[in-house]
Every structure is written in structure tokens, then in C-alpha cells.
Image (tube, grey):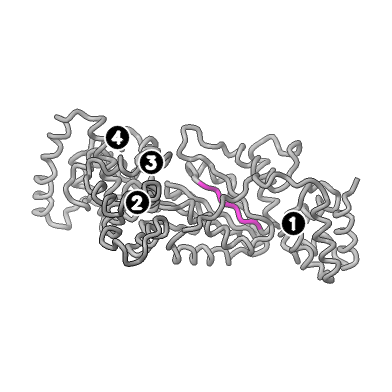
Amino acid sequence: MRSTFGARLRAHRHAAGLTMEQLAEASGVSARAISDMERGRSVAPQRRTVQALAGALALSEADRSTFLAGRTRAAPARPASRCALPRPIADFTGRGGELDRLGRVAALARPAPAAAPVATVSGVAGVGKTALAVQAAHALGERFPGGTFFLDLRGMHARPTGPGEALARLLAALGVPEGETPVHDADRAGLYRDLLRGRPALVVLDNAADEAQVRPMLPGPGPSLTIVTSRRLLAGLDGVHRLSLGHLSAEDAAALLRSIVGVGPQRQADAVREVVELCGRLPLALRIAGNRLTSRPQWSVRHLADRLADERRRLDQLTAGDLRLAAAFNLSYDQLSPSARCLFRRLSLLPWPEFDARLAAVFGPAGPDDTEDALEELVELSLLQAETNGRYRLHNLIRLFARQRLAEEEPAAAHDTAQRRPAAARDTAQRRPAGRLPRRRALAG
């Protein structure tokens, strides 16, 4: 039996002299979704969807109120938790430039046949990729009346979410009845793209494992926006807008710590600056430090700064409840090949913050080509920063993590021998003309 809401929608559409296709074009809601609503197959159209239809139908104020109220009575709503956005972070700080850039990408969303924009957000563990994507989704949600959806792809887990399972969850969130979900993954992907072709929706695919996992969930033409976060650069994806997150500025990092702890701008300013730098301006490290302070009111910021000053214990200090910075890094480390793990551990022996491929090769387990491949693997997983002119940099907290892994996984004699190599290698490099440097392949991304 057709729902009261579906019958009312059909009546208003006929009164406006619109076909389903015309209403779809005017509202940004797909013709398929309109058909499902009119036939009573859409269990609970989202309020934003109904508002978009009401606007396209140019309803009077009285008819609009009845129309919106009818949506509520149409049928029991699906659980709000189905692919719902996480709550926004109340003390989210900084990232104004990045939010503006995602806003510009969102402005590119146009009805089909225009391509639906996709933005990737990459960066090291703890740099705030998910927080940025969620903040952006809450801020941009009003532009997408077809709904906002969030799905954790569990990319760093031993068994990431498969594309088929992810698509099934997204289709259910978009209103496809469970019994009508296609069996084959390719058909699920096709139906998903078809639904987004006419639906102005914002989808956050968080924590992607790699390109193969996320590619089936990328939209075709239509007015949607997809934001993908990953520790990997996802360099194999075509036609996406790439955003690489680095650590916070000193000012934003200090503001974040103060907002968590409740420290006034001028109170303990020197200690705040020290904690910020000891945390490498990394949002997760700052949040852990702030949580430790708020859970121990007898501690001062100076006391925490003194505890973090010991490099040997710094990572152990950056633990608060179930938040552990080293555990976040370890998820990335577990993704590496054995040769990349070996190089990563031994790079912690370099006494300089920057180095090139030639110096890295001093520690490589094999030849220069294998060393270069391992370096690119580290860059791809955001464990290593690619600087200009073929140079690399280890974030200070990642260097401490690499040193910790070295101490636990390699005999002391092996890395004591390796530690004597860098100085000789650097002296040789300085005597060699710059033009003699081996050319490296371009880094992905």
C-alpha cells in the first residue's frame, strides 16, 4: 500500500505539472529515489531530501509544513547510526586553509553529466585526517540535502573492510532495502553510482587501505562529494583533488593544547611552547598530552614538559587511556615490507634531520634500487616526508618510534656497527660534485 507521504508527493508533483525527471533535475534528488518514495518503497526519506523536494515543488507555507510532517509519519525511520557522521570535535583548532580548500572542491559538485568531485586527505598517523574530514562534512552538510554519510574502511587493520561489504552498508544507508542489494560487487558499485547520479550527498570514506579498496566506491557523474582519508597517498587514483596534511603551525598547536587544558593565553606560555614542540605539533600527540593534564589536575604544564623532555620515555608518556601514539604508528609500520621496515628502523641512527637516498643506502639491506623502493614505500605510507631536491625528513616522534623498533628488533651489535657509517658516507657525499648524484625516479603523489 502506498504511503500517505508518497501519495502526497505524487499529488504535488502532478499539480506542479512535473515529470519525475523534471522534479529530479529541479531538486537534485534522483528520479529513482522519487519513484521509490511515491511507491512507498523508501522507508524514511531524509529531512534534507524532503526539504529539497518541497523547494522544487514551490509549495505554499501551509503545504510545506504538512509535507514535511507527512515525511515523519510515513514509516519508522532507519537507525540514525547507519553510516552517520561522528560527532564534531568541539575544540577543533586550525586547518582553516584546508577547510577552505575542501569547500572549494565541494563547490565543484554539479548535476550530471558533470563529474562528481573526490578529495583525498593523506598524512601520517595522528595528523588529524579523520577530524578534518568530519569537521568539513558537518560544515558542508547543508550544501548536500541528499544526506551526509561516514564509513570507516578499517584500512590499517589486519582485515580491512572489503569493497563489497562497504558498498552494501552504503546502499543500505541510501535506502536500498536489504533484500534488493545486488549479489555481485560490480553490480553493487553500479547501483551505488546510479543512486549518487541524482543525489546531492556527501560521503566520507575514512581510513582507506589502498586504491583497490576505495575505487569501487568512487562516484560517477552527479552532484555528490566524496572525501577519502588514508595514511597512503593513493597515487593510483585518477582525477581526484589531493590534500596532504602536515603538522599544525606553532600557533594553532598551542591553541589546541590550551583549548583542551583550559590554560589562558599568557599562563605557562613557555611550558606550553615546549610541550607543543616535544609533541611535534601533531594533533593526536597534543590531544594525548592535553588529556593527561586534564585527568591529573595536580600536574602543571611545566611538569608534563619535563616528563616529555626525556627522549627515551617520550612515546611512553604520550599515552592516555586507550590513546597511544606508538600504537598508531605501529599500525603503519605493520604495513611495510621487511626491507622497508629494516631501512625505517636504521634511519633513526642518522644524526641529521634530513638526508638523501645516497645516505639512506648506507643502511639499506640491499642495493641502491632496493633502497629507493623502500624509501618510496615509506613516503607512500606517510612515515617519511619527501622534501625538495630529492631529500627526505623523519618527523621527530616517528624517529623516536623507529629507534624504539630498532632497539627491540635488532641486536645491539648490528646497529652499533651501522651507526658508524653515516659520517663517512656524508663526507664522501660532500666531496662528490652535485651533478654526480644518482637520479631517482619521481615519487608517487
Quarter of the image where the N terminus is located: top right
Measured Cα–Cα span from mark 1 to mark 3:
44 Å
Measured Cα–Cα span from mark 3 to mark 4:
26 Å
Residue 320 within the magenta-colored segment of the rendering: no
Q: Position of residue 254 (x, y in %)?
A: 35, 61
Establish if 268 lies above or below 364.
below
Which residue sits at x=80%, y=60%? 68
Q: Earlier in the sequence, mark 3 or mark 4?
A: 3
Q: Quadrant of residue 226?
A: bottom right
Q: Position of residue 323 (x, y in %)?
A: 41, 42
Give the residue number, with chain letter if any, for mark 2. Answer: 443
Give the residue number, with chain letter if any, for mark 1. Answer: 30
Going by the numbered disc 1, the residue's amino acid type is: Ser
* Camera-nearest label, 3 or 4: 3
Measured Cα–Cα span from mark 1 to mark 2:
41 Å
Write the start and end of the magenta stretch as one range.
Answer: 201-206
Going by the numbered disc 3, the residue's amino acid type is: Arg
Give the residue number, with chain letter if any, for mark 4. Answer: 339
Establish if 75 lies above or below 223.
above
Disc 1 + disc 2, Cβ < 8 Å: no
Question: Does dot 4 land on a helix, a strand or a loop?
Answer: helix
Q: Quadrant of residue 415?
A: top left
Give the residue number, with chain letter if any, for mark 3. Answer: 324
Q: Earlier in the sequence, mark 1 or mark 2?
A: 1
User: Overall secondary structure of the magenta stretch?
Assistant: strand
Residue in the foreground of this view, choosing between 57 and 118: 57
Q: Earlier in the sequence, mark 3 or mark 2?
A: 3
Residue in the foreground of this view, choosing between 412 and 199: 412
Mark 4 crowdedness (10 Å alpha carbons): few <14, some 14-19, many ≥20: some
Q: Is residue 324 visible?
A: yes
Question: Does dot 1 land on a helix, a strand or a loop?
Answer: loop
Measured Cα–Cα span from mark 2 to mark 4:
18 Å
